């Protein structure tokens, strides 16, 4: 059996622990197609937060308390950067983590595509699951927010290092594209997803997400093939608006999922009207989707109606959920330990 999982970082990585254990039980092969919309360049390095969360978690090197980054991490480089006043100071890169980004960036600069770099990094971590970026091309989630003087006014950013850090994160080109697309007269601007999420804790007045580069992005080699050969495609209980949607913003990936032979079963990240962890509720509000199992199920939509889902696995609390033309089942959906997660995966695969 072949299983493909569309996934973000932290919630998705936990889910994949269960998928891997289930696959070992039944002798299945697993391919994870991972969101790259959160990726960014920092201090000259390419950082792939979701790929790394998945790789570290499956490789046994993730910090379980923090939910991201490495166990036993130290922060010498971060402190040294702070001593120089180097921006951005709001995104912490640990010393161990930095080694990953150094290797990745060196390989990318030498001309290797991201999927090959990911494979090379995974030879160390042996995740037991094939990890593929959704695309090798630039695809960055930017967030259109109301401009505030603190963010927008050049006068307020007279610190050269602040300006250069910002232009890297929210490229003027991306900002202009977003502005041009909607004919914004001003008063709004694009910032990189990580700046919105980490620096501003998703607390800014927010209009929408833009997946910069998505129109031109092609699926990474292996992605559409894996989907076409899959016996089941699972949508992990990841953040719908900023982890799953950017994967599907790559037209070739969306088409492979919506038109492929494999049944598609999603697992709800929302239980009883609230995210289990994190701020998915804020992201859903931005895209105008109710924070509920029904809301997310409707966002994904029925494959029979051009959407994604054949099946939608919801928590027992949400057993009443109805999505037209989608089979809905209820099961315990809290990933409290690996056994509980395996049971979730089994329920999802059995629906297929
Ligand atoms: P990212 O960290 O932003 O890349 O996104 P994740 O892939 O980590 O997704 C976060 C989502 O996982 C949130 O919407 C959470 O509600 C969901 N999540 C986290 N833990 C659990 C859990 O135990 N059960 C379920 N069903 N969802 C969970
Ligand atoms: Ca993420």
Image: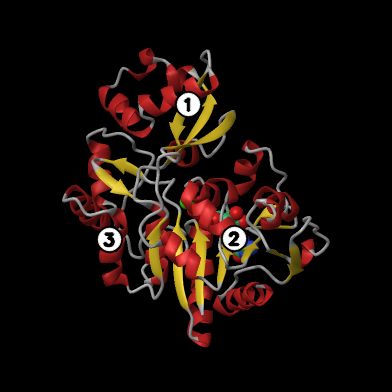
Mark 1 vs mark 2: in front: 1
Q: Which residue is mark 2?
A: 237
Q: Work out whether mark 2 precedes mark 3 in sequence or the reverse, and give the earlier one.
A: 3
Q: Nearer the viewer, residue 74 or 21?
A: 21
Tell me which residue sits at (58%, 58%) in the image: 259
Element type at marker 3? helix
Q: Which residue is mark 1?
A: 178
Residue 157: x %, y % from top left: 35, 19
Seen in the picture, residue 94 relative to 210 is either above or below; the reply is below
Q: Quadrant of residue 351?
A: bottom right
Tell me which residue sits at (72%, 49%) in the image: 295
Residue 14: x %, y % from top left: 51, 67
Tell me which residue sits at (42%, 15%) in the image: 153
- Mark 1 is surrounded, within 10 Å at the Cα level, by few (under 14), some (14 to 19) or many (20 or more) other residues, namely many
Position of 271 with respect to 158 (left or right) is right
Check mark 2 vs ligand 1: CB closer than 8 Å? yes or no: yes
Q: Of the numbered discs in the image, which one, if any, rests on residue 116?
A: 3
Residue 175: x %, y % from top left: 43, 25
Q: Work out whether mark 1 precedes mark 3 in sequence or the reverse, and give the earlier one.
A: 3
Q: CA distance from mark 2 to mark 3?
A: 26 Å
Tell me which residue sits at (51%, 14%) in the image: 186
Q: Nearer the viewer, residue 195 or 187?
A: 187
Q: Nearer the viewer, residue 311 or 292?
A: 311
Q: CA distance from mark 1 to mark 3?
A: 31 Å
Residue 38: x %, y % from top left: 43, 46
Seen in the picture, residue 297 relative to 88 is either above or below; the reply is below
Check mark 3 vs ligand 2: CB closer than 8 Å? yes or no: no
Check mark 1 vs ligand 2: CB closer than 8 Å? yes or no: no
Q: Quadrant of residue 328?
A: bottom right
Mark 2 vs mark 3: in front: 3
Position of 164 with respect to 127 (left or right) is left
Q: Quadrant of the C terminus?
A: bottom right
């Amino acid at each position: 059996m072949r299983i493909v999982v569309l996934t973000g970082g932290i919630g998705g990585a936990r889910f994949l622990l269960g998928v891997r254990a289930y696959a070992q039980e039944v002798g299945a092969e697993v391919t994870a197609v991972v969101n790259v919309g959160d990726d960014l360049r920092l201090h000259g390095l390419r950082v792939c937060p979701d790929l790394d969360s998945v790789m570290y978690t499956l490789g046994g090197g993730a910090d379980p308390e923090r939910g991201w980054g490495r166990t036993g991490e130290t922060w010498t480089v971060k402190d040294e950067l702070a001593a120089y006043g180097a921006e951005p100071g709001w995104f912490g890169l640990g010393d161990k983590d930095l080694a990953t980004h150094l290797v990745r960036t060196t390989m990318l600069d030498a001309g290797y595509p991201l999927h090959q770099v990911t494979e090379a990094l995974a030879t160390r971590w042996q995740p037991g699951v094939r990890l593929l970026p959704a695309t090798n091309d630039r695809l960055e989630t930017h967030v259109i927010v109301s401009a505030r003087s603190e963010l927008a006014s050049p006068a307020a950013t007279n610190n050269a290092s602040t300006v250069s850090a910002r232009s890297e994160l929210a490229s003027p080109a991306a900002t202009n594209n977003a502005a041009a697309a909607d004919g914004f007269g001003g008063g709004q601007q694009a910032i990189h997803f990580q700046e919105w999420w980490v620096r501003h804790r998703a607390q800014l007045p927010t209009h929408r997400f833009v997946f910069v580069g998505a129109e031109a992005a092609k699926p990474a080699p292996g992605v559409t093939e894996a989907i076409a050969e899959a016996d089941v495609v699972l949508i992990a209980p990841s953040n719908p608006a900023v982890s799953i949607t950017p994967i599907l913003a790559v037209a070739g990936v969306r088409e492979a999922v919506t038109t492929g032979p494999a049944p598609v079963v999603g697992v709800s990240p929302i239980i009883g009207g609230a995210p289990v962890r994190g701020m998915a509720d804020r992201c859903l509000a931005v895209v105008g989707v109710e924070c509920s199992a029904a809301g997310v199920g409707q966002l994904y939509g029925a494959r029979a109606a051009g959407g994604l889902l054949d099946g939608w696995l919801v928590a027992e609390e949400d057993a009443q959920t109805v999505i037209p033309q989608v089979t809905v089942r209820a099961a315990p959906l809290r990933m409290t330990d690996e056994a509980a997660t395996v049971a979730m995966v089994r329920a999802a695969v059995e629906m297929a």
